[in-house]
Amino acid sequence: MSYTITDKCIGCTMCAKNCPVGAISGALKEMHTIDKELCVNCGVCGKVCKPGAILDKYGRVAKPVDKKDWKKPVISQAKCYGCSLCIVECGFDCISITKPRYRGDIHTYAELSKPDKCVGCALCFEVCPMDAIKMV
């Protein structure tokens, strides 16, 4: 079951603006909807919904979380081999591959290059084949 928007929605658009996969639609001051086919159950919509209009995947009202308390990806330089899967998965272009430090440097790795844009959806964590990303 995916996240659901209830009739408590006031149309503030915060959920739609923060959804990393673009699964939420609706106009300002009108009830929004979540496309269940696109929703990845990351919970970002519930974290930003102040009116408590979002039900989580278990049917419980999602609790808002202050942005300063959102978990962010921490990427292990030792485990990451720069495959770029996390970059492809990130809906907000928050992760990038480091530049080689010297000519011939083959140990590049992913890094959270735009932490202020990160919504803490954990899609990068879920796709990492090397277990190089932790959400902290």
Image (spheres, rainbow, N blue to C red):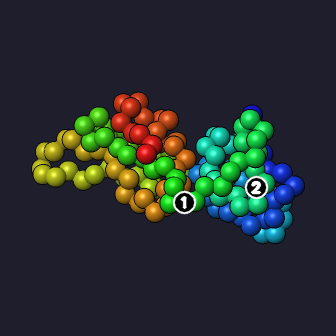
Quadrant of the rendered image containing residue 60: top right
Left or right relative to 32: residue 75:
left
Alpha carbons under labels 2 and 1: distance apart: 16 Å
* Badge 2: residue crowd in 10 Å (few <14, some 14–19, many ≥20): some
Would you identify the image quadrant in which residue 52 lies? bottom right
Asked if residue 114 shows in the view, the reply is yes
Type of the residue with mark 1: Lys
Image quarter in which the C terminus is found: top left
Could you tell me which residue is drawn at 79 percent across and 50 percent down?
Answer: 5
Q: Is residue 19 visible?
A: no
86 lies above or below 114: above
Q: Residue at x 78, y 38 (%)?
A: 59
Question: What is the three-letter code of the residue carrying label 2?
Answer: Gly
- Report which residue position mark 2 lands on: 52
Residue count near mark 1 (Cα–Cα under 10 Å), binned few <14, some 14–19, many ≥20: few
> In terms of sequence position, does the residue under pointer 2 or pointer 1 come before the other?
2
Q: Quadrant of the N terminus?
A: top right
Helix, strand or loop at label 1? It is: helix
Residue 120, image x and y in percent? 52, 50
Q: In which image quadrant can residue 41 be found?
A: top right
Asked if 131 appears above or below 74 in the picture, the reply is above
- Residue 24 in percent (x, y) is at 72, 53
Q: Position of residue 8 (x, y in %)?
A: 84, 57
100, 130: nearer the viewer: 130
Left or right placement of residue 14 versus residue 104 in this view:
right
Give SS at disc 2.
Answer: loop
Residue at image mark 1? 67
Q: Please identify the residue farthest to the bottom as the structure is shown.
A: 28
Q: Is residue 80 left or right of residue 62?
A: left
Q: Kindly identify which numbered label has been placed on residue 116.
A: none
